[in-house]
Image (cartoon, rainbow, N blue to C red):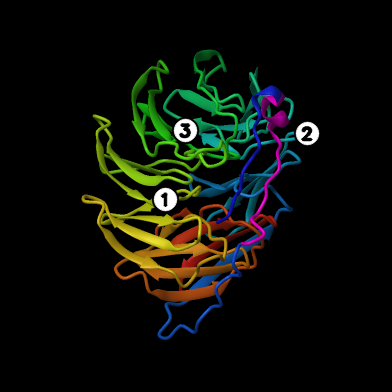
Amino acid sequence: MRHRLLLALLSTSLLGGCGSLFESSSRPLPTPLSEIHSAQPLQVKWSHSLGDAPAGSFQPVYSQGDVVVATPDGQIYTYNADSGREVSLVKTKRDLTSGVGVAGSLLLLGSADGSLLAINRTSGALVWEQKLTSVTLETPVAGANVAAVRTNDDRITGFALQDGKQLWSVPHFMPQLTIRNTGSMNAVGSEVIMAGLAGGKMQVVSQDTGSVLWEGVVASPKGATELERITDVVSRPVYNGGQMCATAYQGRVACFDAKSGNLMWARDVSSSRPVAMDDHNVYVSAEDDSVWAFDRITGRNVWKQDALKYRSLSGPAMLGRFVLVVDAQGVAHLLSNESGSIVGRTDVGTKGQTGQPVSLGSSALIKGENGRLLMLSLG
């Protein structure tokens, strides 16, 4: 089992937001790939090299026909989504700790000196800046009128998009040990923000007031040691058709009724990566890199794919009607949403852990730890 953990001792204040990731020395070798027959063609439409970035962070964003992506050294690139042509380059002259959030004409970023920056998307001018209670590793999320950011002291704070005024702040309890968190919040429309929490919980808060509307238990801590009791929701919860779903490390995947917060179903599977949903199923890349599909309504296990175990997969994403995952060797795999069988494969040139691909219908954005950004589409 992969342990991608941050030793977050309270006495060291999250070690300044930087910690040690470690892998189990007993982890099995990656499963060798088998030949695919009657494969679905895949095509890399365009690609760029942006330099190394921490695993799972600095993910690209699709907005208004463009792809926007930031780099740790403070550069923000905008590319045309169809052609990959560079549209603009903004140099912030600030070191960054988070990816870019997009809110209309504003770009939202977390800086290494503990600030939230709002930058004009066209001119690159700093519109406003707010000092945070701690550094953030998470991409800020934007609602209708609010920018929300989670800092390393596990506080979620909302700021007015217009002028950066602080509107509300929600603190959370932090266990002694927690997993490095680079993105476990998601805005739903203009009303609420979903947030995964340490200790296996998911919280839904009002965008306007920060009031907690409901809190659900994805998984409960178990075990005798602090390490065994880590059950954090560190991947972004997803919303689809009145249903909210999330996964917990060393825990479960669980789905809730979005309005009431009532638990619809939960199944035991450990993951620290985001899930994907379509009209029928919820898809999960487990910690052993098996890929699961669960029926959205009942939670019944529809299929399980073990052919990619121990290949360090990304979270799944939808590519057309297929399920897409990318492994640490830079190979993209396409799975049937109905059976889980592998129906397509191509080398995309990423290396190391890859963030969850960004689904754009029949195309998907992929960014690897080595900084390679590309658009993959069905051939």
Task: Tell me whether circle 1 and circle 3 mark residues in contact (CB < 8 Å).
Answer: no
Report which quarter residue 320 is drawn in. Answer: bottom left
* Count of numbered badges drawn on the protein: 3
Q: Are marks 3 and 2 in contact (CB under 8 Å)?
A: no
Task: Find numbered disc 2 in the image and state the secondary structure of the residue it sits on.
Answer: loop
What range is drawn magenta here? Answer: 12-26
In magenta segment, residue 294 = no
Is residue 305 visible in the rendered image? The answer is: yes
Closer to the camera, 275 or 112?
Answer: 275
Mark earlier in primary sequence (3, 2): 2
CA–CA distance in space, label 2 to label 1: 35 Å
Residue 378, quarter of the rendered image:
bottom left
Please report the residue visible at 36 percent of the width from the left and 34 percent of the height from the top: 217
Q: For this view, does 201 lie left or right of residue 339?
A: right
Magenta stretch mostly in which secondary structure? loop
Mark 3 is on which residue type?
Gly
Callout in the foreground (2, 1): 1
Amino acid found under the numbered disc labelled 2: Lys
Return the residue nearer the eye: 306 or 49.
306
Q: Residue 15: say if magenta.
A: yes
| Image coordinates for residue 32, horizontal then vertical, percent | 56, 77
Residue with the mark numbered 2 = 93
Q: Which mark is residue 275?
A: 1
The answer to whether any part of residue 362 appears in the image is no
Q: Nearer the viewer, residue 84 or 375?
A: 375
Which of the two labelled residues, at mark 2 and mark 1, occupies the earlier sequence position?
Answer: 2
Foreground mark, 1 or 3, reads: 3
In this rendering, the label closer to the viewer, 3 or 2? 3
Q: CA distance from mark 3 to mark 2?
A: 37 Å
Locate residue 4, reporting x and y percent: 61, 48
Which label was assigned to residue 199?
A: 3
Residue 152, position in %: x, y?
A: 62, 28
